[in-house]
Image: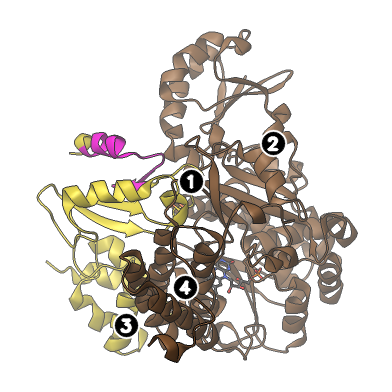
Chain colours: A brown, B yellow
Amino acid sequence: MKIFIPKDTSAVALDADDVAQALSRAQHALEAEICRNGSRGAFWLEPLVEVELAAGRYAFGPIGVEDVPELLECLPDRLEDHPKYLGLTEDIPWLANQERVTFARAGLGDPVCMHTYTKLSGFSGLEKSATLTSQEIVTQVLESGLRGRGGAAFPTGIKWQTVLDTPADQKYIVCNADEGDSGTFADRLLMEADPFQLIEGMVIAGAAVGATLGYIYLRSEYPLAYRQLSLALDIARREGYLGENILNSGRDFEIEIRLGAGAYICGEETSLLSSLEGRRGLVRAKPPLPAKEGLFGKPTVVNNVLTLAAVTTIMSQGSQYYASLGAGRSLGTLTVQLAGNVARGGLVEVPFGVKLSDVLKDYAGGTFSGRPMYAIQVGGPLGAYLDSTRWDTPMEYEEFAKVGGMLGHGGVVIFDDSADMLAQASFAMEFCAHESCGKCTPCRIGAVRGAEVIDKIRKGDRVNENLILLEDLCETMESGSLCAMGGLTPGPVRSAFKNFDFGVKGPDKSLSREGIS
Amino acid sequence: MFDVERLNTCISVWKDRPGALLPLLHDVQSAFGFIPPDALRPIAKALNISRAEVHGVVSFYEDFKTEGVAKHLLKVCCAEACQATGSRDLQQFVEDRFGEMPTKNQDKEGISIEAAYCFGNCASGPTIELAGRMIGRVTPSKLSRLLDDLD
Ligand SMILES: Cc1cc2nc3c(=O)[nH]c(=O)nc-3n(C[C@H](O)[C@H](O)[C@H](O)COP(=O)(O)O)c2cc1C
Ligand code: SF4
Ligand code: FES
């Protein structure tokens, strides 16, 4: 018998370590082996304990320490008597109905077991790449239609082509693992549950553009991801997937992890590069593009964790397969992260094009509080707050833009009807003020003023004038900011005012400025 | 007392590597608990940059502390997904008890408190980190119990 209990940040935050300890005390009597697997991303069921018998893996969850004695009594032949019994894990609809591609392996086994990884077709993308020229790899990525998963959705193949075509004595692959958006945890889950996949993706990227060194810029808030990645890197090195002449391809590649230091702005790629160089995380103007003059002035691929991970599938299954998933110009799968006030939160991987409302209906299970859903912020702190009239939108980059939203990194933060939308609007400004790199005045000062103005509106102080002032501020931030931090912060602010009725009427557009001053 | 040997050990690991300043500061902070002011000059010298530059980096990043924190550090996630599950109440509870965040230093209960912005536990918030441990689904009463259990 084998018992699985995840070693995952969210599972551990809900006492999975204590459950594992309680189970291991009974290990001998049961003649069971205990495996600390990764999470499957069904965080609403964590800690999710699985018991493997001849017929398959049976799930129980959420399991607290207090549930363990009864669980032990039910093993191995009265499983269904346990109140937390969920049946075969693979039959749980919440998991079974997803289209797991990037996250197909997550939770199946020990995340840093090389044997598990290769048995589940790990490194087959790299093996394929080892037989191809750099241009052939880049062409496959181009043909897959893959777009960056970090938020900006830039076509990955085009970025790689630029780096490949820029001659240099040194090129770099930088993995953006800063995942700062509230409501997102897909990068974390991938790094904790399937770290070899990221390593494989980075080695392929190196082969594609002629880079020999990769950095993973990992936020310091993810200590477990750091641990799993470090272990995985050591093992990959030992097994010849890193180092010199990888898989006899004649290509070399090394990876180093660098920790961030608690700055949201360092997720922006040029700020990230400044930080990697050992400087303050100031945003740089583009051009020059990082693809031409990036880290230490050298051509650099900067890609999100999920982008690099997707490349392993594209190489192993082909660009046609990948492009067959999704809709419109958004191809492949989207990892929706259901977060906030949600009953069944976690990672939902589905092809692009599924409506947000369908994801909510099929997976969210309502709010955690039991009250009606009211506002949903999609795409992180710079994403708009959407009211229920906008939830029917297909989850595609272009479709979301049409309703004034953005998909970003796929975070879906649900609020119930007790949400204070004015407070959320104010928070968007406060967050911008707190995290601004300081380079542009509209962002650095405008956001501080924005929060003050919203505070005045709340107090009923000259509401109409202050609404006009707020609109002015938003316009200035949008047009006068170097990056999306200042440029997109007006998004959540405006949407909170526009899409929700909290007794404050919008500025009367027919009034001229002179008319009210 | 400021242990120069320890600092030099940290410096020697990173001195000749590209982009050394952040990882070096992380190491110094784990060795000393914070970045001692006296460490700036030797760090600057070793990396061949100005002291102002080192200071600029230390002050830019939230993680780097310039003075010691209390025995226990409590970080409360104040980002949107946790707000949606009640972190504002939690924040209120913490501030009622310890004063407005961030408390700089040693309050009488030996706890420093800080706002944090997302731990990647957004499906099971509100989230806190207490004495290095991440904890989910935290309510004021659960936090109260956790604080009582601290030594
Ligand atoms: C304020 C700000 C924060 C960002 N944070 C992240 C982040 O945490 N992770 C990420 O991958 N991209 C982030 N991005 C996007 C990056 O700038 C960049 O587009 C991305 O890393 C490119 O990789 P991709 O093409 O694979 O998405 C951020 C952008 C901005 C403006
Ligand atoms: S918009 Fe804000 S974060 Fe972006 S470069 Fe300007 S000051 Fe920095
Ligand atoms: S928003 Fe609190 S953990 Fe992500």
Mark 4, ligand 2, within 8 Å: the answer is yes
Q: Pick whichever of labels 4 and 2 is earlier in the sequence.
A: 2
The structure residue drawn at horizontal position 81% and vertical position 64%, both measured from the top left corner, is A129
At numbered mark 3, what does the secondary structure look like: helix, strand or loop? helix
Q: Which residues are magenta?
A: B128-147
Q: Position of residue A114 (x, y in %)?
A: 66, 45
On screen, residue B116 above or below A59:
below
Tag 2 secondary structure = helix
For label 3, the residue is: B56
Which residue was labeled with disc 2? A95
Cα distance between the residues tagged 1 and 3:
43 Å
Residue A265 is tagged as: 4
Using the image, name the chain to which the residue with label 1 belongs.
A
Structural distance between the alpha carbons of marks 2 and 1: 28 Å
User: Which element is circle 4 on?
Assistant: helix
Q: Are marks 3 and 2 in contact (CB under 8 Å)?
A: no
Which quadrant does the C terminus of chain A fall into? Answer: bottom left
Which circle's residue, 2 or 1, is located before the other in the chain? 2
Task: Work out whether disc 2 and disc 1 sit on a shared chain.
Answer: yes
Q: Nearer the viewer, mark 3 or mark 2?
A: 2
User: Dot 2 surroundings within 10 Å: few (below 14), some, or many (20 or more)?
Assistant: some
Left or right of A68, for residue A59? right
Structural distance between the alpha carbons of marks 4 and 2: 34 Å
Question: Does the CB distance between marks 1 and 3 fall below 8 Å?
Answer: no
